[in-house]
């Protein structure tokens, strides 16, 4: 298999967009009193001296740096050179259901459904790989999509991308649980299990 091209590698990355509760480092070259680490508040804004309140949420670090530069230039700072970088990223997805470690996992760059499940250390013993639901809010509407991990593994369709605030739910296979229960109890009691299977 040939190695990926530069373009392939760039496609695997997504530019980071600042979100509420993230921390960003603002560095204004030559003006140490304006250079600081700031936490984005719950409404998605930050406040800086000479700049005022700025909407940071949903912007890339480059876009935010440009906005701060424009504000400083308008407030008598001569040729401001501003860089913004991410310090602490609080954007996460929730992986729940039949996975080894349900919980919240950070989204750094591009994340796919298979990677999200792998972050939770894979599917659990009784997982139904054909019943994986991704819940997402789009334009104030709650949406859900059903995926089949086996089909993705077999290359039948692409591994879908998941985003910050998505909820991934892996369903349970009742058949697997019942089969395990039958095998565990089979050595102790044979007749009732045979009757149960025949129904």
Image (spheres, helix red, strand yellow):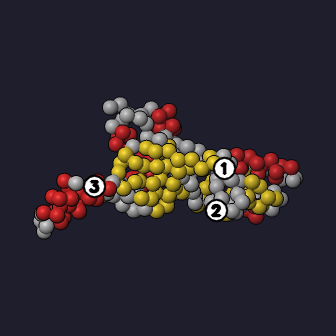
Secondary structure type for disc 2: loop
Residues under numbered marks 1 and 2 in contact, where contact means CB atoms less than 8 Å apart: no
Sequence-wise first label, 1 or 2: 2
Q: Nearer the viewer, mark 3 or mark 2?
A: 3
Position above or below: 66 against 185: above
Sequence-wise first label, 3 or 2: 2
Which residue is under mark 1?
140
Secondary structure type for disc 3: helix
Q: Quadrant of the C terminus?
A: bottom left
Q: Is residue 27 left or right of residue 133?
A: right
Q: Is residue 116 left or right of residue 187?
A: right
Residue 97: in sight, yes or no?
yes
Which residue is under mark 2?
21
Sequence-wise first label, 1 or 3: 1
Instruction: Classify mark 1: residues with Cα within 10 Å, few (<14), some (14-19) or many (20+).
Output: few
User: Which quarter of the figure has residue 150?
Assistant: top left
Alpha carbon separation for disc pair 1 and 2: 20 Å
x then y, percent, for residue 162: 51, 47
Q: Is residue 131 left or right of residue 111?
A: left
Instruction: Classify mark 3: residues with Cα within 10 Å, few (<14), some (14-19) or many (20+).
Output: some
Residue 83: in sight, yes or no?
no
Residues under numbered marks 3 and 2 in contact, where contact means CB atoms less than 8 Å apart: no
x then y, percent, for residue 117: 41, 52
Number of numbered discs present? 3
Secondary structure type for disc 1: loop
Residue at the spot 43% in from the left edge and 36% down from the top edge: 158
Q: Nearer the viewer, mark 1 or mark 3?
A: 3
Q: Quadrant of the N terminus?
A: top left
Which residue is under mark 3?
176
x then y, percent, for residue 22: 62, 60
User: Which quarter of the figure has residue 187?
Assistant: bottom left
């Amino acid at each position: 298999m040939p190695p990926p091209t530069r373009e392939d590698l760039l496609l695997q990355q997504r530019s980071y967009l600042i979100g509420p509760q993230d921390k960003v480092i603002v560095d204004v070259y030559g003006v140490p009193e304006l250079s600081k680490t700031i936490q984005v508040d719950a409404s998605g804004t930050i406040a800086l001296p000479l700049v005022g309140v700025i909407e940071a949420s949903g912007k890339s670090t480059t876009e935010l740096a440009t906005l701060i530069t424009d504000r400083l230039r308008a407030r008598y700072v001569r040729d401001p050179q501003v860089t913004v970088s991410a310090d602490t990223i609080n954007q996460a997805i929730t992986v729940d259901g039949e996975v080894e470690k349900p919980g919240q996992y950070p989204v750094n760059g591009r994340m796919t459904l298979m990677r999200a499940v792998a972050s939770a250390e894979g599917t659990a013993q009784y997982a139904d790989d054909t019943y994986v639901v991704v819940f997402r809010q789009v334009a104030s509407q709650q949406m859900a999509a059903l995926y089949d991990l086996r089909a993705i593994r077999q290359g039948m369709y692409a591994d879908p991308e998941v985003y910050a605030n998505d909820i991934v739910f892996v369903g349970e296979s009742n058949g697997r649980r019942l089969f395990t229960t039958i095998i565990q109890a089979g050595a102790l009691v044979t007749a009732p299990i045979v009757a149960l299977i025949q129904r």
